[in-house]
Image (cartoon, coloured by chain):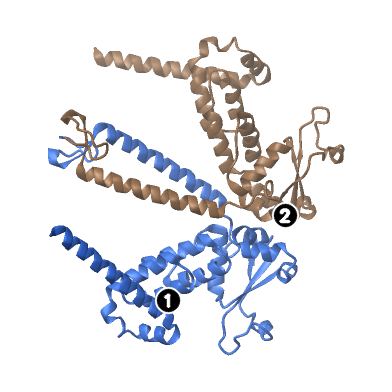
Chain colours: A blue, B brown
Amino acid sequence: MYCQSCKNVYDEEESGTCKECYEEASETEEELKREIDDLRSRLLFLRLLSPTLDASSIGHSDILLHAIPSSPSHPSPSSADAGRLETPAVPAHRVILSSRSPVFRAMLDNEMEESRSGIIKIYDVSYDVLRAFVHYMYTAEVLLDVQMACDLLELAEKYEVKHLKTYCEKFITSKVNNDNAIIHYAFAHRHSAKQLLEASMSVLVESMPTLAERDEYKELVEKDPRIVVEIYETYMSRQVNTAAEKESDCSCRN
Amino acid sequence: MYCQSCKNVYDEEESGTCKECYEEASETEEELKREIDDLRSRLLFLRLLSPTLDASSIGHSDILLHAIPSSPSHPSPSSADAGRLETPAVPAHRVILSSRSPVFRAMLDNEMEESRSGIIKIYDVSYDVLRAFVHYMYTAEVLLDVQMACDLLELAEKYEVKHLKTYCEKFITSKVNNDNAIIHYAFAHRHSAKQLLEASMSVLVESMPTLAERDEYKELVEKDPRIVVEIYETYMSRQVNTAAEKESDCSCRN
């Protein structure tokens, strides 16, 4: 037989589909590709000029965002504020911040200090992270590494920018391995990142026998022993399930 | 043989693809669907609250657009202007108008009257069309009928909103038939809408023998005889091509 797709001859046992299904599948693929083209062109249209990159869009900006990095020597955001506004401000627009984040919307729609002054201070964040955050609000685009993804996830959670949180979580999840699973598990726990929590746990239960030797483990026991307890509990409940499955397997065979 | 897709048995002459190609095609389809999901969620994120629908986004608006419908008794946009601002204004944001239209950008970035006053008058357009136009700027969405598509195409051309012009042109092209081909051809001609021009011409050359009897034809001869000449010229050149093809067909056979 002759394959209509790769044009090679194949045997009966290597058969895939009938002609009708092949033609339908080809049509479906064409339709999906047309839909992708259409969606891409709408995305390109809706993407805004980012004030972090495009000077011409700064002209109409009506908000300035200031990154206030966390400083261990001055932990409270109080008197020393003025002196800590060292990095340049990131310009933005009320309408964009309000559209993307219910937290900004509440802040800017009500007569809060930020709305009156047009200045929003964002605590415990670096200038680069704030810049990437604002850029994402305009373009739905960001270049990630794991650190940036973690920082942006925290910010996205704080300002309830769900789409960015999900995007970062997916990225971090794809990077989970033996070496970082404890750290990511604890991080996911703090930020209710369910997908990342599952992925880290799956890696953790695989490496339980050597877990207690790791430095990150010891640190976590010091810092947040309840999370460690949770890891053991999940491990034990999976053990019980596996044992039960094995038993039911055996009783079926007998 | 057994089709892996529809699960039916088929004969050799009804064969479509080999197993490998079937599996590849299934994977491709899954990938394309994932990409569509991803694009849709990004679109949903980038879509803005439209000030034509959502009262809360009007708060930050810094521009008011006024529709000035064409009135035959006062054809020039001059002295009677003030009295003609009858319909409600459509609120909008400089940053959005600037992002979507180079014409608005030039108007608002430079110290033109519109930029200073925050009021932009849009001539020869109804309130409903202006509202749909602004809504599209925020959402990339619009509900079309042919009249709305034509009106929006004109406006999109004037303000160089290419994405909307293409969208309307596609819609009108899908509605071209024997009854409206002349009107759409003339419209496409006026607005350099190439796809619509081709589609209308294809319908026109099919119905050439009865064309001269139509009222729209007579109107067009009165109004813009050069377009009518163009229709005849295209028809004649296609006739010549068809004749040449037939001749080369005959000579091949002899």
Dot 2 surroundings within 10 Å: few (below 14), some, or many (20 or more)? some
Residue B62, image x, y percentages:
74, 55
Task: Read off the chain for label 1.
Answer: A
Which image quarter: residue A33?
top left
Locate residue A147, reporting x and y percent: 45, 74
Q: Is residue A162 above or below residue B63?
A: below
Q: Residue at x 35, y 86 (%)?
A: A215
Identify the residue at image location x=62%, y=62%.
A102
Instruction: Classify residue A40 as left or right of residue B23.
Output: right
Q: Nearer the viewer, mark 2 or mark 1?
A: 1
Above or below B118: residue B75:
above
User: Could you tell me the amino acid type at mark 1?
Assistant: Ala
B24 or A178, nearer to the observer: A178
**Label 2 sits on residue:** B61
* Label 1: how many Cα within 10 Å (few below 14, some 14–19, many 20+): some
Taking the image as shown, residue A224 lies to the left or right of residue B254, namely right
Q: In the displayed structure, does residue A176 sit left or right of residue B230?
A: left
Q: Measured along the vertical axis of the image, is residue A92 above or below residue B225?
A: below
Q: Nearer the viewer, residue B7 or B126?
A: B7
Nearer the observer, A15 or A186: A186
